[in-house]
Image (cartoon, rainbow, N blue to C red):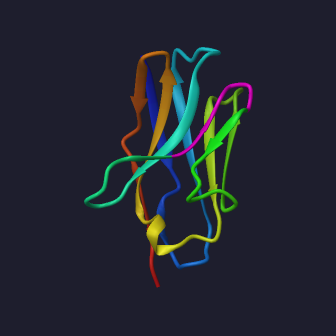
Amino acid sequence: QVQLVESGGGLVQPGGSLRLSCAASGIILSIDAMGWYRQAPGKQRELVATITRGGSTNIADSVAGRFTISRDNAKNTVYLQMNSLKPEDTAVYYCNLHRGSLDYWGQGTQVTVSS
């Protein structure tokens, strides 16, 4: 099985930056893609960004140019650098590992953008 542990959330002012980290443990395969999703109150969970083991990325239009996803395969860790944060980025951010038809999720970390 796979366990995902996120860290790095918190409260930040508009225009500020945060960096989220997600460490995966257990059996990690070369086919595994990792990424971040978020869910704001009253809204559905949505994709933020994903990255394959080879480094191919997919970024949501709403965060493109502000957020960057990266991955350290040696540490089985994925990062989300979030810059120029906006109040609408406020949400619980979930780490995801996708393997074929399987999805593993972290417990989520709260990001609040407010003055």
Q: Residue furthest left?
A: 42
Query: Does the magenta portion include 52?
Result: yes
Percent x, y of residue 31:
61, 16
Q: Residue furthest bottom?
A: 115
As drawn, 12 above or below 66: below
**Rendered residue at 41%/27% (across/down):** 104
Query: Does the magenta portion include 20?
Result: no
Percent x, y of residue 72:
71, 34
Percent x, y of residue 22:
54, 40
**Rendered residue at 72%/33% (across/down):** 56
Residue 49 versus residue 8: which sits nearer the camera? 49
* Magenta-highlighted residues: 48-55
As drawn, 10 above or below 47: below
Residue 72 versus residue 86: which sits nearer the camera? 86
**Rendered residue at 56%/18% (across/down):** 28
Residue 19 versus residue 39: which sits nearer the camera? 39
As drawn, 39 above or below 32: below
